[in-house]
Amino acid sequence: MTYCDGSPPPPAHHTRLGSGRCGLANPIEPTDGTPTHAERVARVSRDHSTTGSLSPKTAEAVADAMFALSTASRVRILGRLRERPHTVRELMAAVGMEQSAVSHQLRVLREYGLVVAERRGRERLYALHDEHVASLLDEAVGHVAHLGQSGKRKAKRGLRDAG
């Protein structure tokens, strides 16, 4: 897994749960000279805004993030984590899924850098990786609301009519 600028995520010890607003995880500044999360985001944003296009590497990273959002159960889990950090047991009750299914979806979300976990005794507490994930989820929900109930059909029809 890499960030959208192609750089690897910080080691797990660079992230702590509950240190940001709303209990979201915030990356801790690395001390090894690697660019900070904020510096990477600023560089990708600047490069995209000045060129108007995405590099193949950035496009692939964005597609990976979108893949992680392509399953309704993962989106529901992210929605719960948007509220506050949860344990697997809490997520099971909230989304009505078996423990193995919740754990599998959390593993995918962790692999794609959307959630982080912190061990609390015998359990793990899961949270959104950072506020970008919350914004991504909010934008996706807003887009679906904008399209309305039949947005998927309208979008397909629009592509068909344009072609």
Image (tube, rainbow, N blue to C red):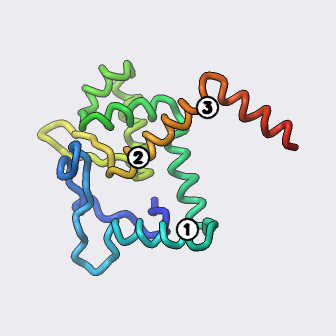
Judge the density around disc 3: few (<14), some (14-19), many (≥20) Cα neighbours within 10 Å. Answer: some
- Looking at marks 1 and 2 on the same chain, the residue that comes earlier in the sequence is marked by 1
**Which one is in front in this view, the residue at disc 3 or the one at disc 2?**
3
Q: Residues within 10 Å of mark 1 (few under 14, many from 20)?
A: some
Residue type for callout 3: Leu
Say left or right for 16 vs 151: left
The residue labelled by disc 2 is 135
Residue drawn 73% across the image and 30% down it: 154
- What amino acid does circle 1 point to? His
Label 2 secondary element? helix
Q: Which residue is mark 3?
A: 147
Label 1 sits on a secondary structure element that is helix
In the picture, the disc for residue 48 is 1
| Residue at x 42% of width, y 50% of height | 111
Q: How many marks?
A: 3
Task: Quote the CA–CA distance across marks 1 and 3.
Answer: 26 Å
Residue in front for this viewpoint, 124 or 16: 16
